[in-house]
Image (tube, rainbow, N blue to C red):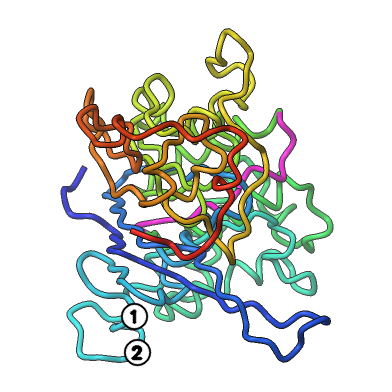
Amino acid sequence: MNNEPVVSLENATVEFETEGSLLNPFGEPDVVRAVNDVSLEIGDREIVTLIGESGCGKSTLGRTAIGVQKPTAGSVSYRGQDIWEARTGGDTEISYSEIRPALQMIHQDPGSALNPNQRIVTSLSLPLRRWQPELGRPERMERIHALFERVGMQPAEDFLNRYPHQLSGGEKQRAVLVRSLLLNPDLILADEAISALDVSLRVEMMDLMLELQELFDTSYLFISHDLSNARYIAEKSDGRIAVMYLGRIVEVGTVDEIIDNPQHPYTKALRWATPNLYGDDDGQPPIRTIDVPDPTALPVGCNFHPRCPNARELCEERSPPEIAASDDGHPCRCFRADEEHEYWDSSPVSKDSDDAVAVGGDQQ
């Protein structure tokens, strides 16, 4: 693996303003910080899986990583080149015309990603015509046919001349996978790419993605809300798992570190909630409440403390920085990862404390 990251995010933040409600149409809009001060690197031929509950900001972070969503603050770079500087037409070392085809995406719903009024072959030809105009029609068709055969859609002609509604869910997902690979990308964002498939097809699809990674030397940012899927594809590729909660990556590490030795209480809760994934023997959920805080009014201090069974008074006051876990060194955003931290001298939060649900800004 090359030491140079394909994509790197540095202190990336993405904020959205919510629209006024019917009861308060002219009020000040609320601000949702979907991505909050995230730094992450994805290397050549690396798979990074991003795991977390729905609404935690995974898709926004993924779109930011491939240059589709502009960060409100911080930066996102492709091989050291700021993507948005290149996109605005500045005098850059790497042009946007080189960056755009290098960063591709597989959507969660392949049906909505394919034009219902066009045959599959037309939808797949468009990116080649746009980004590789030097290719003639015979060369384009040869490449498309070869990839369709490679993903098991044989004979290719039987599928290419169909419309999207004439394909099954698995066939549409393979067609979208082929489209993402046509331009030989360096990184593919797979945003819940297997969640719409039957359980029996998910492992098959992940194995196919891994085979194609070897063939094309590409990297994946694989987003999932299912820790078992994240574990499978990361374990098979020696990749990493990044755990996201309310806009922040709270822990990142190898499969052994995240599954066998999680440091953040949220990671432990996700592990407990995943069937057949080393559940705790006593069967007690390692979480105080299943309710996720309102993203427009985040808790003061650590965002997770209202749900954390190990919360202490310091957690209500301060947001933990990224701390290296004391036993194996993988990054974790939790005071408990440091055995010498003043957190341990702080008093535990009462499980019935009203202070545990106080809200306010994202304090440091």
- How far across and down, in percent of the image, does residue 127 sit? 52, 73
Q: Is residue 278 above or below residue 110?
A: above
Question: Under tag 1, what secondary structure?
Answer: helix
Report the residue at 62% width, 86% height from top. Answer: 28
Alpha-carbon span between mark 2 and mark 1: 6 Å
Is residue 154 visible to us here?
Answer: no
Q: Is residue 4 left or right of residue 335?
A: left
Question: What amino acid type is highlighted by mark number 1?
Answer: Trp
Is residue 163 visible to us here?
Answer: yes
- How far across and down, in percent of the image, does residue 257 sit? 34, 26
* Residue 47 is one of the magenta-drawn residues: no
Determine the image quadrant of residue 71: bottom left
- Give the number of the disc on residue 84: 1
Q: Is residue 87 above or below residue 99?
A: below
Question: Under tag 2, what secondary structure?
Answer: loop
* Residue 191 is one of the magenta-drawn residues: yes
